[in-house]
Image: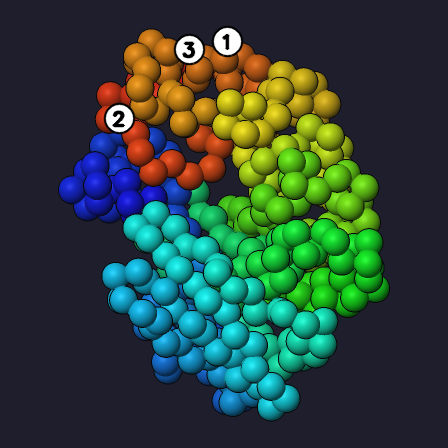
């Protein structure tokens, strides 16, 4: 994360980080272009990127205006999305590590009617492929497009960003038809984005998000409101030659088969219990290891700081022995890390290089 590189390594680049620690480099070229110029165009008012987005695409029917609220040091911005039939507003706050919503844009059920005016970004294939050309040794990763300013790749997760997770869960019982209408609106935009990705040289594109984990919603809700909307996106991605990794940062074990049944090529983050998840790597490997690539599983909270290099090495070895047998496993921290000790990252990388197949 940029926070880690700045705080601990003097602001070196991600590529310099990978080279220093002899890790396999990853590039994240998120590149949008207007889907229907001149109706759609790049946002002339955008001053910085939002969560998981690049240059924002807007139109005369989908204008976005941001205004700093209070002390600029608090990094609180009120956004107004202006449409022909009304406004959506959201309040975003940030620190050096991340961003979060203080106010969700969908406040009334009728607000989803405004989503018909959403600008529809397409993938800038040439720009992504240029990054792939410039970094032939890197894993090239991307995202399914999310809602502007603050969103997530998966349909359910994107809706939770718009409405609020608790309100979304309650709405599945109070008004399931409304929930499905919202999810379908978001899905349509994502499917159009996917259709523009033919020829893009991504190795993996990400779908999903933590709000679909079994530590947030039940398997029943997953089967009714997540997989029916995300599985078609995976199928559409395969149709244009893309591989998909389904990202579930949280509990996975009760929905492991449900996730794989959607057809992804890989799953992450395999978060262990000590990190708030429930992953049992050896068990998961037995159940799904012959169907998908598994990515993650390493406990970065407890083994990238405040432990010995030997303990870090032992955690790497555990991951390899439980999930690496027969291949199909990529060792990785289970999601982002913000704080880490250099000697422990060195131990992580060195032990990983020694995990070889006989």
Q: Which of pointers 3 and 2 indicates the residue nearer the eye?
A: 2
Q: Which of pointers 3 and 1 indicates the residue nearer the eye?
A: 3
Within 10 Å of the Cα at label 1, are there few (<14), some (14-19), or many (20+) other Cα atoms? few
Question: Could you give the CA–CA distance between mark 3 and mark 2, rounded to whole angstroms?
Answer: 16 Å
Q: Which of pointers 1 and 2 indicates the residue nearer the eye?
A: 2
The residue at 82%/54% (across/down) is 173
Question: Could you give the CA–CA distance between mark 1 and mark 2, rounded to whole angstroms?
Answer: 31 Å
The residue carrying mark 3 is: 314
Q: What mark, if any, has residue 341 been given in the picture?
A: 2
Within 10 Å of the Cα at label 2, are there few (<14), some (14-19), or many (20+) other Cα atoms? some
Q: Quadrant of residue 195?
A: bottom right
Q: Can residue 85 be seen in the rendering of this structure?
A: yes
Viewport quadrant of the N terminus: top left
Q: Find numbered disc 3 in the image and state the secondary structure of the residue it sits on.
A: helix
Relative to residue 46, is residue 235 depicted above or below? above
Q: Find numbered disc 2 in the image and state the secondary structure of the residue it sits on.
A: loop
Q: Find numbered disc 1 in the image and state the secondary structure of the residue it sits on.
A: loop
Q: Quadrant of residue 281?
A: top right
The residue carrying mark 1 is: 358
- Residue 152 point in image, percent of width and height: 56, 56
Q: Is residue 225 left or right of residue 197?
A: right
The residue lying furthest to the left in this view is 10
**Quick one: label 3 or label 2, which is nearer the N terminus?**
3
- Residue 156 point in image, percent of width and height: 67, 54
Within 10 Å of the Cα at label 3, are there few (<14), some (14-19), or many (20+) other Cα atoms? some
324 or 52, which is in the foreground? 52
Question: Could you give the CA–CA distance between mark 3 and mark 1, rounded to whole angstroms?
Answer: 19 Å
- Residue 13 point in image, percent of width and height: 24, 46
- Residue 154 point in image, percent of width and height: 63, 54
**Quick one: label 1 or label 2, which is nearer the N terminus?**
2
């Amino acid at each position: 994360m940029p926070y880690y590189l700045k705080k601990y390594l003097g602001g070196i680049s991600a590529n310099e980080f990978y080279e220093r620690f002899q890790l396999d480099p990853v590039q994240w070229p998120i590149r949008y272009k207007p889907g229907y110029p001149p109706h759609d165009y790049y946002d002339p008012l955008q001053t910085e990127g939002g969560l998981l987005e690049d240059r924002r695409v807007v139109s005369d029917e989908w204008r976005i205006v941001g205004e700093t609220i209070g002390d600029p040091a608090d990094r609180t911005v009120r956004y107004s999305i202006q449409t022909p039939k009304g406004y959506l507003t959201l309040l975003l706050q940030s620190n050096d590590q991340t961003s979060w919503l203080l106010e969700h844009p969908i406040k009334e059920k009728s607000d989803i009617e405004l989503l018909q005016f959403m600008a529809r970004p397409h993938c800038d294939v040439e720009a992504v492929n240029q990054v792939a050309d410039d970094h032939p040794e890197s894993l090239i990763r991307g995202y399914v497009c999310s809602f502007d300013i603050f969103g997530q790749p998966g349909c359910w997760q994107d809706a939770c960003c718009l409405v609020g997770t608790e309100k979304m869960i309650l709405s599945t019982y109070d008004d399931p038809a409304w929930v499905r209408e919202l999810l379908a609106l978001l899905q349509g935009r994502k499917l159009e984005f996917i259709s523009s990705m033919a020829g893009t040289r991504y190795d993996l594109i990400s779908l999903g998000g933590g709000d679909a984990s079994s530590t947030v919603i039940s398997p029943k809700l997953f089967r009714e409101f997540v997989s029916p909307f995300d599985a078609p996106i995976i199928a559409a991605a395969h149709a244009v030659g893309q591989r998909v990794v389904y990202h579930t940062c949280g509990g996975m074990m009760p929905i492991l088969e449900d996730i794989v049944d959607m057809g992804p090529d890989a799953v992450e983050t395999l978060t262990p219990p000590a990190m708030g998840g429930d992953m049992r790597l050896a068990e998961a490997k037995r159940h799904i290891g012959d169907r998908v690539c598994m990515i993650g599983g390493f406990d970065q909270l407890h083994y990238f700081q405040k432990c010995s290099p030997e303990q870090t090495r032992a955690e790497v070895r555990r991951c390899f022995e439980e999930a690496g047998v027969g291949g199909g496993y990529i060792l990785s921290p289970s999601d982002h890390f913000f704080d880490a000790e250099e000697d422990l990252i060195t131990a992580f990388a060195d032990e990983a290089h020694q995990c070889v197949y006989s």
